[in-house]
Amino acid sequence: MDQQSLTKKQNRQEDKRGLILAAARKLMAEQGGDFTASAIAQQLGWKTPGIYYYFPNLQAIREAILLELTGESVEITRSAAHLGKDVIESVTLAFEARIHHYQAHPGDFDLLWKHYPAGGIPLEVLQEDIYPQVQSLMDELEEMLEDGKAQGLVGLEVESRKLVNLMVCMAQGINLMYLSFKKVEGDLKFSLEEMILEGKKNLEKALKA
């Protein structure tokens, strides 16, 4: 098989893997839990053995979904941060983008932040595949803050890594609260945008401390 044919075959396989992952994510989001190979096959109009041509087992699909979800979360945060005209705007835009993304994709939030932490993901997958993605983002944001200190935009006493963690935790807390209330059709005193604005003000204050 020549290189061009091999590349086409690899691209077709990646497309099929993508279809499987999308179907599995849909099932997990709808059912609030796991999936079976037969359910994925039914979603795609395939026969069940076809699923195992692209993934050796269901655990491999779970791990691929986790990697995909993490990559999307990292990229959304990174892209938003790079839109800021200075480090303070970069951090607040990243904060806002994480909230809006998961409000638009509540199933993804449940999978990444509620379902998977309780699941049996092997430590080596976390250490070799998941943590490096997250670490690269945290390092990048921390470097932005350190540059901001050098420019006099960020207070010298600010602990950059702690502040980045604070931004992530605040975003996840707001998402958890609003998505939980949506599920029970509850009402909150403050709107989502009001909470985002208040969060941004607090981050700006912390950055300038």
Image: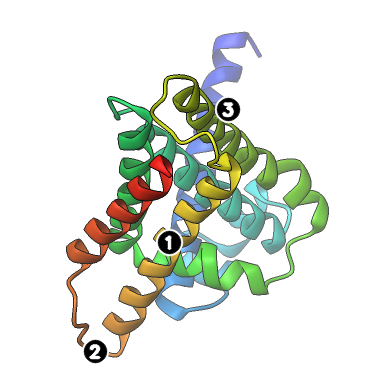
Residue 23, numbered label? none
- Spatial CA distance of label 2 from label 3 is 47 Å
Are dots 2 and 3 in contact, CB under 8 Å?
Answer: no
Q: Residues within 10 Å of mark 1 (few under 14, many from 20)?
A: some
Q: Tell me which amino acid carries mark 3.
A: Gln
- Nearer to us: label 2 or label 3: 2
Instruction: Tell me which numbered mark, 3 or 1, is placed earlier along the sequence.
Output: 3
Q: Tell me which amino acid carries mark 2.
A: Gly
Question: x and y percent of residue 138 in the render?
Answer: 57, 39
- Spatial CA distance of label 2 from label 1 is 21 Å
Q: Tell me which amino acid carries mark 1.
A: Met
Question: x and y percent of residue 62 in the render?
Answer: 63, 60
Circle 3 residue:
10
Question: x and y percent of residue 74 in the render?
Answer: 49, 42
* Disc 2, SS: loop
Res 174 quadrant in image: bottom left
Please indicate whether residue 191 sits to the left or right of residue 164 in the image: left
Residue 186, numbered label? 2
Q: Is residue 200 above or below residue 158?
A: below
- Nearer to us: label 2 or label 1: 1
Instruction: Tell me which numbered mark, 2 or 1, is placed earlier along the sequence.
Output: 1
Q: Residue at x 50, y 62 (%)?
A: 24
The quarter of the image holding the N terminus is top right
Q: How many tags in the picture?
A: 3
Circle 1 residue:
170
Are dots 3 and 1 in contact, CB under 8 Å?
Answer: no
